[in-house]
Amino acid sequence: MTNRVSQRLQALPGSATMAISARARELAAEGQDVIAFAAGEPDFATPEHITAAAARAAHDPANHHYTANAGLPPLREAVARYTLEYSGVQVDASEVMITNGAKQAVYETFAALVDPGDEVLLPSPHWVTYPAGVRLYDGVPVPVETGIESGFKVTVEDLEKKRTPKTKILVFVSPSNPTGAVYTKDEALEIGEWAREHDIWVMADEIYQRLVYTGGDAPSIAAVTPRFENWILINGVAKAYAMTGWRVGWMIGPKDVVDAAARLQSHATSNVSNVSQHAALAALTGPQDTVEEMRLAFDRRRKLMYSMLAAIDGIACIEPEGAFYVFPDVSRLLGERWATSSALATSIIEDAAVALVPGESFGAPGFLRLSYATSDSDIEKGVERIARLISG
C-alpha cells in the first residue's frame, strides 16, 4: 500500500490560524511573552448568566442522553426569532439546524449543495476554511479578488467576470473576516439581485453581524433581496457572546437543503452537546447588554490598532468597519529582508514574539491579519514590537 492517507486529506492544508496560535502557545510555554493577534477569539469570559444556564443543564439527566440531531427544539425556535430580529429574515424553526460551531455549518452547506466540478465564488481576501470546505466535496473554489482601493468589497461586475455555467454558490461575508469590510444595503441588494437572476446560491456567513462600529448594521443579503430563495445563512454564538469554545452555530435555509444537511449530521456528529445548546439558548434569550459592552470595547481597540499600524512607515491600511481584524498591506516592506508576507509574519512571531496571520492564508499575499480581540495594553505593546522590528 503506497498511500496510507487518502488523496483528499493529503491535499487538505491545516488551518493557518490554528497553526500560528499553536506556535504562540509553544513560545509562551518556553517562557516568552507572546502577544497573540492571530486567532479570531474574544478575550472576554462568557457572560455569567450563560455559564449558569450551562451548569443547570449539566445537572439535568435529560441532557445526559442523545437528543434531536438537528438541535433542541427550544433553541431552534430561539434562533428563528433571533434571525428575524437581527437579520430581518423570517424563518421557521424547521429551517434551522444547530451545528458544532459555525464552521460545521459551512462544511455541511457545501456538502448539501456542491457536486463535483461545481464552482464556488469566494470574494478574496477570504477566511481560510472556505476553499478547504469546497475542495473536500470536489468543488472548485474561484477567488474574486478585491483590494484596499475597493474597500475589500466585490461588485456585480467583479462577480460577472468570474461567473461560468458551472457557478453554483457565492460566499457572501459581511462583516468580513479577515478585512472587516461591511456591505451597505444597496451593495448587498445589487449582489443579491445578480445571484437571483443567475440562479446562484448565496451562502451568507453572518457570524460577525453584531460587531459593527460605523453607526449602522450589516444588512442581511437574504432580507434585502426581494423574491430571493436560494440562500443559506450561517451564524452562531461564538463571536458576539464570547463562546468560541462552546461550539454552537447554526445553518438556516430551505427545508429540503437543511434536512439533507441534518441527515449528514446524524451520521457525522449526532447532536451538538446538550449543555452547550442550553448555554446558547440562554445567550439568545437572556440579557444582551454584555454584547454591547464587548462591541464598545472592540470599537476602542479597533481605533487604537488601526491608528498605530497606519503610523508605521511602509504599512498601508483602511479602518475596518466590523468584525475584529485589521488587514494591513505590507507589500512595500517586501524585498531582500522579507521576500513574502509569510516570511514577514514568521519573523514577527520569532523575532518580536507577536503572533499574526500572513495574507497568503486568506488568498491575499502582501497583507497581514491582526486581531484586536485582546487587551488595549497588548495591542500597544504588540504593535510597538512590530514597529521596532520593521524599522530596525
Image: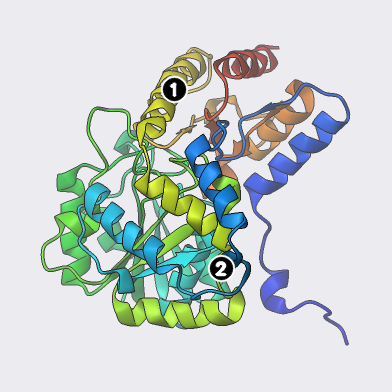
Task: Identify which residue is drawn at 49% across, 29% down.
Answer: 328
Task: Identify which residue is drawn at 36% across, 42% down.
Answer: 175
For mark 2, give the secondary structure. Answer: helix
**Left or right: 385 with respect to 104?**
right
**Left or right: 99 with respect to 361?**
left
**Left or right: 134 with respect to 172?**
right
> Does 290 appear above or below 62?
above
Q: Which mark is residue 297?
A: 1
Q: Which mark is residue 152?
A: none
- The disc labelled 1 sits on which kind of residue? Ala
The image shows residue 5 at horizontal and vertical percentages of 79, 76
For mark 1, give the secondary structure. Answer: helix
Can I make out residue 163 in this image? no
**The one of 301 and 49 positioned closer to us in this rendering:** 49
In which quadrant of the rendered image does the N terminus lie? bottom right
Which one is closest to the eye, mark 1 or mark 2? 2
Q: Is the residue marked by circle 1 packed among few (<14), some (14-19), or many (20+) residues within 10 Å?
A: some
The image shows residue 68 at horizontal and vertical percentages of 48, 76
> Does 306 appear above or below 238?
above
Task: Identify which residue is drawn at 36% across, 31% down.
Answer: 289
Q: Which mark is residue 62?
A: 2
Q: Earlier along the polypeptide chain: callout 1 or callout 2? A: 2
- The disc labelled 2 sits on which kind of residue? Ala
